Image: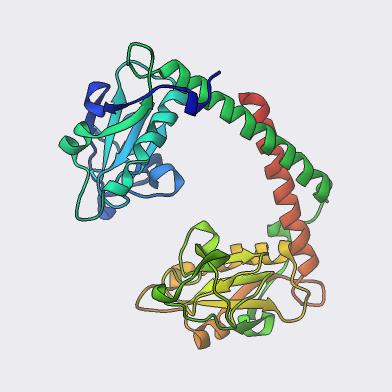
């Protein structure tokens, strides 16, 4: 098979190969709880913003979505049934429904996103006129067969790497250990200050950021809290810790095993009476998630409120936090999830 740089490429206008349709907004007050993916104009989770129980004429499957607003120009392939908001457009290819070819084309469209911004949206007419580079046949037509084969090869390489990684992780974690279920354990409330020491992050303004490789942790709700990579160094540098947002997306926690620096909107938490442990700290990520609904932009998770926050924890017979239980529970969950991933890979290869 030819490499990308060995193929002939040509600029193709989207209107020559696909039909473009609008989505339909489902406003927050209209959303019904359910399992149907609702695709919005985001950059994460394959464009899925919510899961709903609604239904409308935007329902579609085996298509590409392209953001016209928000993260303008970002494109995703959706093999499943989904609803689509009006901040994205549905792109239906006329000559192929092959999933791998559509993924290739979605990434090619996304390569054009630098040409758009909040003030230059990608509406239907502009999207139809969009020209982007694709590999073509000798006749100058999009080479769907090549795209499909190329993506299939890439997929096989990534699956093989992931399969090896998962098997290695399972070997390191060992077999699940039988322990009481969460419902069988006794639980108690503990003030956060009794469980953790809390330290501040440090403000780093955008204009002062130096390009580099050190993760910079911001008060976000995705990407494990990493909002960029910098070459700066300051007093917030830390590792093997829990970063907890007290502003921005409050009361969201992420575990950071790597060295990183943290903004002043994120607090650095270390266990007070137990050695910081990856599996224990990951358990606490879920514990903090149970408290999120209390906090908002107007009711911040500031330091004094954070220190007084009560955390429900499983306890030992003596009534102390059962860190060993938390560790094994997390390990069991990871082992089972890895085993599910392996079964899924084997089923779909």
- Which residue: 29% across, 36% down? 55
Along the viewing direction, whichever of 18 and 3 lies nearer the viewer: 3
**Residue 347 vertical placement versus 228 (above, below):** above
Q: Position of residue 217 (x, y in %)?
A: 53, 68
Residue 143 can be seen in this image: yes
Relative horizontal placement of residue 237, taking residue 37 as reference (left or right): right
Q: How is the image coloured?
A: rainbow
- Which residue: 68% across, 36% down? 161
Q: Residue furthest left?
A: 125
Along the viewing direction, whichever of 192 and 146 lies nearer the viewer: 146
Q: Position of residue 260 (x, y in %)?
A: 60, 69
Image mark count: 0
Relative horizontal placement of residue 26, taking residue 44 as reference (left or right): left
**Residue 341 vertical placement versus 220 (above, below):** above
**Residue 329 vertical placement versus 263 (above, below):** above
Residue 59, quarter of the rendered image: top left
Residue 344 can be seen in this image: no
- Which residue: 55% across, 60% down? 224
Image quarter (top left, top right, bottom left or bottom right) of the N terminus: top right
Relative horizontal placement of residue 165, taking residue 248 as reference (left or right): right
Residue 254, quarter of the rendered image: bottom right
Along the viewing direction, whichever of 129 and 57 lies nearer the viewer: 129
Q: Position of residue 190 (x, y in %)?
A: 65, 79
Q: Position of residue 234 (x, y in %)?
A: 57, 80
- Which residue: 72% across, 41% down? 166
Image quarter (top left, top right, bottom left or bottom right) of the C terminus: top right
**Residue 209 vertical placement versus 93 (above, below):** below
Q: Residue furthest bottom?
A: 304
Residue 18, quarter of the rendered image: top left
């Amino acid at each position: 098979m030819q490499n990308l740089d060995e193929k002939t490429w040509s600029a193709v206008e989207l209107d020559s190969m696909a039909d473009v349709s609008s989505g339909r907004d489902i406003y927050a007050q209209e959303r019904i709880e359910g399992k149907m993916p609702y695709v919005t104009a985001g950059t994460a989770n394959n464009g899925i913003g919510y899961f709903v129980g609604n239904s409308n004429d935007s329902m579609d499957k085996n298509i590409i979505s392209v953001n016209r607003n928000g993260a303008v120009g970002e494109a995703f392939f959706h093999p499943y049934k989904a609803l689509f908001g009006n901040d994205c457009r549905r792109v239906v290819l006329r000559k192929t429904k092959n999933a791998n070819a559509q993924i290739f084309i979605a990434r090619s469209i996304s390569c054009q996103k630098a040409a758009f911004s909040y003030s230059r949206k990608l509406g239907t007419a502009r999207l139809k006129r969009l020209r982007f580079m694709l590999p073509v046949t000798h006749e100058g037509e999009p080479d769907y067969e090549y795209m499909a084969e190329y993506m299939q090869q890439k997929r096989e390489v990534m699956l093989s790497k992931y399969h090896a990684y998962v098997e290695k992780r399972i070997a390191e974690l060992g077999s699940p250990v039988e322990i009481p279920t969460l419902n069988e354990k006794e639980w108690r409330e503990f003030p956060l200050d009794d469980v953790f020491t809390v330290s501040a992050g440090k403000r780093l303004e955008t204009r002062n950021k130096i390009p580099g490789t050190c993760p910079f942790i911001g008060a976000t709700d995705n990407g494990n809290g990493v909002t960029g990579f910098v070459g700066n160094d300051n007093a917030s540098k830390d590792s093997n810790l829990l970063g907890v947002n007290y502003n921005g997306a409050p009361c969201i926690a992420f575990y950071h095993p790597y060295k990183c620096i943290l903004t002043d909107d994120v607090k650095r938490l270390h266990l007070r009476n137990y050695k910081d442990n990856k599996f224990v700290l990951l358990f606490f990520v879920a514990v903090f998630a149970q408290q999120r609904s209390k906090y908002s932009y107007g009711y911040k998770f500031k330091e004094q409120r954070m220190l007084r926050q009560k955390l429900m924890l499983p306890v030992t017979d003596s009534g102390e936090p059962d860190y060993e239980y938390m560790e094994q529970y997390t390990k069991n969950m990871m082992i089972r999830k890895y085993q599910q991933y392996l079964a899924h890979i084997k089923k779909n290869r």
